[in-house]
Image (tube, rainbow, N blue to C red):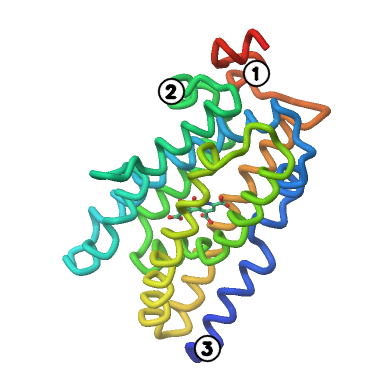
Amino acid sequence: MTATREEFEARLRQIGADRYHDKHPFHARLHGGQCSPDEVRAWVVNRWYYQSRIPMKDAAFMSRVTDPALRRAWRSRIEDHDGREGNEGGIRRWLRLAEAVGLDPDYVASGEGVMPATRFAVDAYVRFVRDETLLEAIAASLTELFAPKIHAQRIEGLLQHYDFADDSSLSYFRNRLGEAPKDVAFGLQYVLDHADTAEKQDAAAAALTFKTDVLWSQLDALWSAYVEPARIPPGAWRPGQGLLISAEAS
Ligand SMILES: O=C(O)c1cc(C(=O)O)c2c(n1)C(=O)C(=O)c1cc(C(=O)O)[nH]c1-2
């Protein structure tokens, strides 16, 4: 049976309450100040891959949209990450964080040290958005409903516990606090308007669940590779690699 709009929205929000990666133990460790400098670096190196692929998945999405109004509503997402006149963009801001934790931004941007599991998870999201229905692609982006809370927790936790944290190094997260709500308000409206049968509601809920898996599995991989007992996969970043000269000397 088709759920009402309110019931369906509650179902989507429950998926976040049950499965969003704010509950992952790696985030508790990061925000609580228990991560070693190398664990933070491993997170920055790997999460880079997610950041770098987000505008590519949004471009993949837009390439399928025939409605100019929908493309216009979507295109600011790409600019939020890639930048525009007067806005350096999220990718640059992420590399500022990389530098603040002692990593060479060129090394991070090369993607060389990214773990295979990170790549598999993120590439699966890009492929999903390219291949599934527009409704499912938009529903998958709705994890951003839950992101402002974790970004606020992260700003607070990192500022409290780590010397590298300041307004400049954390500007990525502070900017997302302003950017994500407008994106997700549009996305939620779209999904509530278009999931007008039980089948479409199930498909949208499954897409959001899939996306929570994409996020969770990246942190599982990070924990198993870098938190003691560390098990770093072949080819992935190792402590000591890709450092700024100044960090090597210290
Ligand atoms: O730090 C986080 O926990 C987090 C989560 C998510 C998310 O829920 O997918 C995004 C972001 N950050 C983010 O910064 C971002 O730009 C973003 C875009 C998207 C998306 O699916 O289009 N998710 C997220």
> Three-letter amino acid code at disc 1?
Arg
Q: Are marks 1 and 3 in contact (CB under 8 Å)?
A: no
Residue tagged by mark 1?
Answer: 238
Q: Secondary structure at mark 2?
A: helix
The residue located at (29%, 61%) in the rendering is: 74
Q: Secondary structure at mark 3?
A: helix
Q: Is residue 112 left or right of residue 215?
A: left
First in sequence, mark 1 or 3: give its number. Answer: 3
- Total marks in image: 3
Answer yes or no: disc 1 within 8 Å of ligand 1: no
Q: Quadrant of the C terminus?
A: top right
User: Mark number for residue 6?
Assistant: 3
Residue tagged by mark 2?
Answer: 110
Q: Is residue 175 left or right of residue 87?
A: right
Q: Nearer the viewer, residue 179 or 246?
A: 246
First in sequence, mark 2 or 3: give its number. Answer: 3
> Three-letter amino acid code at disc 3?
Glu
Horizontal and vertical percent for residue 58?
Answer: 33, 52
Up/down of 102 relative to 143, above or below: above
The residue located at (37%, 45%) in the rendering is: 81
> Three-letter amino acid code at disc 2?
Ser
Q: Nearer the viewer, residue 214 or 181?
A: 181
Horizontal and vertical percent for residue 133?
Answer: 35, 64
